[in-house]
Amino acid sequence: KVATFKGTDGNIAVKTDNGKFSISLNETLTGLKSAEFKDDKGNTATITGNTIALKGKDGNSSATLTSSALTFKNGEDK
């Protein structure tokens, strides 16, 4: 039988070795709509197609970067 995988868009690597499957993420991810990273303290960085947002563990924004502005928690644009 042949297994068909849909929706991976090249981001998931599926390999076989002696009849065993190995599934992993590729080192370079493409075509994603967003990604969220969280550290062990609960701080997050969220990346979308046009924004990078940093939030503290309380969920409040500390900085936002877009193509037109860098905004810090105090509302000041740079």
Image (tube, rainbow, N blue to C red):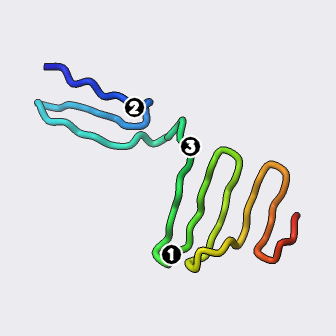
The image shows residue 32 at horizontal and vertical percentages of: 53, 41
The amino acid type, in three-letter code, at marker 3 is Lys
**Mark 2 or mark 1, which is nearer to you?**
2
Which residue carries the number 1 mark?
A: 42
**Looking at the rendering, which quadrant does residue 18 occupy?**
top left
**Looking at the rendering, which quadrant does residue 59 occupy?**
bottom right
Quarter of the image with the C terminus is bottom right
Q: Residues within 10 Å of mark 3 (few under 14, many from 20)?
A: few
The image shows residue 66 at horizontal and vertical percentages of: 77, 53
The amino acid type, in three-letter code, at marker 2 is Gly
Are the residues flagged by discs 2 and 1 in contact, CB closer than 8 Å? Answer: no
- Tell me if residue 52 comes above or below residue 62 in the rendering: above
Residue at x 68%, y 71% (from the top left corner): 61
SS state under label 2: loop
Residue at x 70%, y 73% (from the top left corner): 62
Disc 3 from disc 2: Cα separation: 13 Å
- Dot 1 or dot 3: first in sequence order is 3
- Dot 3 or dot 2: first in sequence order is 2
SS state under label 1: loop
- Dot 2 or dot 1: first in sequence order is 2
Which residue carries the number 3 mark?
A: 33
The image shows residue 14 at horizontal and vertical percentages of: 29, 33
The amino acid type, in three-letter code, at marker 1 is Gly
